Structure formats: structure tokens, C-alpha cells
Image (cartoon, helix red, strand yellow):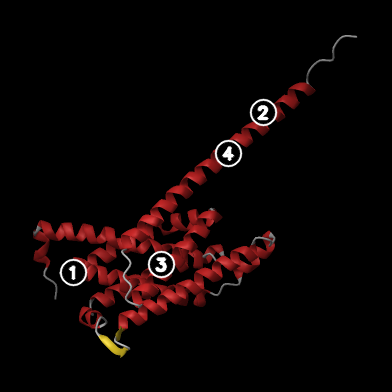
Amino acid sequence: MFDFSIFAQPETWISLLTLTFLEIVLGIDNIIFISIVASRLPREDQPRARTLGLLLALIFRVGLLLSISWIVKLKDPLFTISNFGVTGRDIILFAGGLFLLWKSTGEIHDKFEEADDTVEEKKAARGKGQFSQIILQIVLVDIVFSFDSILTAVGLAKEVLVMILAVILAMGIMLAFSQAVSDFVNRHQTLKMLALSFLIMIGMMLIAEGLHFHIPKGYVYFAMAFSLGVEALNLRLGRKSRLAAEARRLAREQQQADKSVEPNPPV
């Protein structure tokens, strides 16, 4: 079924490395969404949800790659509305964009509602998330992101085997770093809000793509990289300010301790 002799050609390895890198870049937003949605579960269930979500995404993408002829047909119009040809890809992207908008906006709303909750109330809210519902949401988003990823793979590589290996390598790398990404996002609330804003932007981009308004992804990823750079500076400044405040507090405590042990002056 597969011709492994293609790996004797340097072009195959270049294509594999390039496609793997692009799959990782395109999968970052998927990891962020999975991390945010999985945070609704108890802490002990979150790794299982992330792993299962990424494995389902891998299975779905490999299945799509084995059905390339069907993927290509998704670009053919199913029906026409006022000279606007609606394809299967348009429907999937439009529905996926609406889902991302709905879910991201709801998460932002919940974050504002949780701001006034006590620690016990936050733990109780985290425990209310049902595992099956979270996995269903992850699967729905995986389907949307998988189509975008597979269409990119089809445009860059000619061999299905190269595409499958690139997807497997990318998923393996994302799975290895999913815990670190999830912990980092959940530990910094401002970064979590920024990630949700990214998902809203991606949702709008998917809706625009479904309506045949092409937005170069380079602009989107540049905006995301610039925002992350600014947020990284804010996090570093905040950490430096906290360290300085802690140093001042310790200095005051040391001064008070020194004053308390000073000998009384002679009368």
C-alpha cells in the first residue's frame, strides 16, 4: 500500500520535517483548547482527558488522510445560494467557527463569574465537569482543526505515508508537552484569557473561511506571537515586581528584628 523507497530521497525527509513543524504550529490552538476545557474536570482526570483528546485527534486525522479522495470532494459545491457555492468544507469551517466562538465566550464569562468565588466553590465547580461531555467537546473541535491540518498536509506533500508520519510525529510531540502547556496556561490567568481571545480570533477566521473570505494565516500567527511576546514581558515584569516586594518585606522584618534585640541605652 505504501512505497517506503521514497525515504531514500532527501526531498522526502525535507517534506516530512517541514510538514511536522507545520502540524505542530497548527496544533497549538488545539492543545490550548483541550487544556482549557479539561481544566473543568478534577485535577486527577485532566491528564486522561488531554491524552484521550489528542489520541482521538490523531486517529481522526489518519483516517482523513486515508480518505483523501473524499477530502478533495469536500471542496466541490454541494448547492448554490445566489451564485455562492456552498461546499462541505465551508459548512464544517463555519459550524466549527461558531462552536469556538460560543465555547470561548462562555469560558470567558465563567472566568468573570468565578472571580468572586471562594476556593471551595471553585473546587466544586471544577468537579461538576462531566468527563463524557468534555471529551465530546474536544472531539468536535478536533474535527474542525483536523480538516484545516489535513488540507495543509495535502497541499504540501504528495505521499500519504509522509503525511501520516508527520501527523504522528507532531501528535507525539504535542502529547509530550501537553502537560507543561496545560499547567502553564492554567497557572497564569491572564495568559488563559489571552488564549481564549486567540480562540475567538480563530473562530472568526474559520467563519470567514467558510464564507470564502480568505485570511492569510501568517497575519493571525504573527498577531498571536506578538501578543504572547507582550504577555511574556508582563509575566517577567510581574515576577520581578513580586521578588522586589518580597525582598523589601524581608528587609523590613529584619530591621524590626534588629531593633527588638538592641540593648537598652544606659540611664
Report the residue at 14% width, 61% height from top: 12
Q: In the image, what residue occupies the spot 30% across and 90% down?
A: 79
Mark 3 lies on residue: 202
Q: Amino acid at mark 1?
A: Leu
Residue closest to the far right: 267
In the rendered structure, find residue 241 and report the number of the disc placed on it: 4
Marks 4 and 2, how far apart at CA: 15 Å
Q: Horizontally, is 9 left or right of 117 in the view?
A: left
N-term-proximal mark, 3 vs 4: 3
**Residue where numbered disc 1 is placed:** 161
Quarter of the figure with residue 249:
top right
Three-letter amino acid code at the position of disc 2: Ala
Q: Alpha carbon of mark 2 to alpha carbon of mark 1: how far?
A: 63 Å
Q: What x and y, as percent, mark residue 94?
A: 39, 78
* Mark nearer the N terminus (2 vs 3): 3
Horizontal relation, residue 20 to residue 204: left or right: left
Give the mark toward the camera: 1 or 4.
Answer: 4
